[in-house]
Image (cartoon, grey):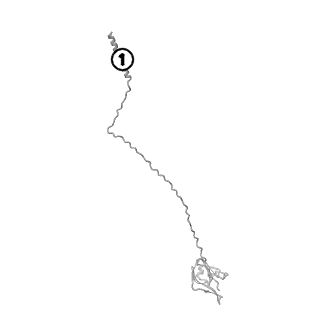
């Protein structure tokens, strides 16, 4: 009887041990996997270089304000000088010489004479040479060329009214002036020669 009881106790002990082992396997904690770290020898620590880019300076151009100050220009207008008044005419002149550009003459006067009633007499000995102005006119009692007039033509002062050209009057080929009246401009040039009639 003691042998059967010992076997039964041994069997119960083995069963308890088996159950305990199964329970430990079931309740075992989760496994932990460790990843080995590989370190490379003699590797210097990494250096991080930070490059900071500075933006270009912004230049702000401020426009200049130009103030224009009006300038008053004083303009002096010089009026042209008034032309000189003409010299008074010489009522009687004795012509000594003449050409297309000038006449040489002396002042004279009309005096009574036994023949032809009058004659021209010089009142000065110093002759004057005067230029002839452009556009000067010449007139005589009968003209300066043959058949220039049909007859004697005079004004109220006994001066000729027949016109002549400068060339015909100054060359003296047909008419020799007797005692003409000379008229001048403001520059002293002769502007008109009006010859006097003398029979």
- On the image, the x and y values in percent for residue 46 come to 36, 40
- Give x and y (percent) for residue 11: 34, 15
- Residue at 34%, 14% in the rendered image: 9
Q: According to the image, label 1 marks what residue?
A: 16
Looking at the rendered structure, the secondary structure element under dot 1 is: helix
Residue that extends furthest to the front in the rendered view of this protein: 2
13 horizontally vs 86: left or right: left
Residue found at x 36% / y 17%: 16
Above-or-below relation of 143 to 64: below
In depth, the one of 77 and 120 nearer the eye is 77
Q: Position of residue 180 (x, y in %)?
A: 62, 82
Which quadrant of the rendered structure holds the C terminus?
Answer: bottom right
Q: Residue at the spot x=36%, y=20% of the render?
A: 20
In terms of depth relative to the viewer, which is nearer, 76 or 151?
A: 76
| Residue in the image at 34% along x and 11% along y | 5
Image-based side of 11 in relation to 82, left or right: left
Q: In front here: 64 or 146?
A: 64
Quadrant the N terminus occupies:
top left
């Amino acid at each position: 009887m003691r042998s059967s009881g010992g076997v039964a106790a041994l069997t119960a002990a083995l069963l308890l041990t088996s159950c305990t082992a199964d329970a430990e396997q079931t309740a075992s904690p989760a496994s932990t996997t460790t990843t080995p770290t590989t370190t490379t020898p003699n590797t210097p620590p990494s250096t991080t270089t930070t490059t900071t880019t500075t933006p270009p300076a912004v230049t702000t151009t401020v426009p200049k304000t130009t103030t224009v100050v009006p300038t008053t220009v004083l303009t002096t207008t010089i009026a042209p000088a008034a032309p000189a008044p003409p010299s008074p005419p010489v009522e009687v002149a004795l012509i000594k010489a003449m050409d297309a550009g000038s006449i040489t003459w002396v002042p004279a006067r009309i005096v009574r004479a036994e023949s032809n009633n009058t004659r021209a007499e010089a009142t000065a000995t110093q002759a004057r040479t005067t230029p002839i102005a452009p556009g000067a006119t010449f007139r005589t009692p009968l003209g300066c060329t043959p058949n220039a007039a049909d007859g004697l033509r005079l004004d109220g002062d006994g001066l000729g009214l027949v016109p002549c050209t400068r060339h015909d009057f100054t060359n003296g080929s047909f008419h020799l002036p007797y005692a003409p009246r000379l008229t001048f401009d403001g520059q002293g040039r002769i502007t008109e020669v009006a010859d006097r009639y003398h029979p």
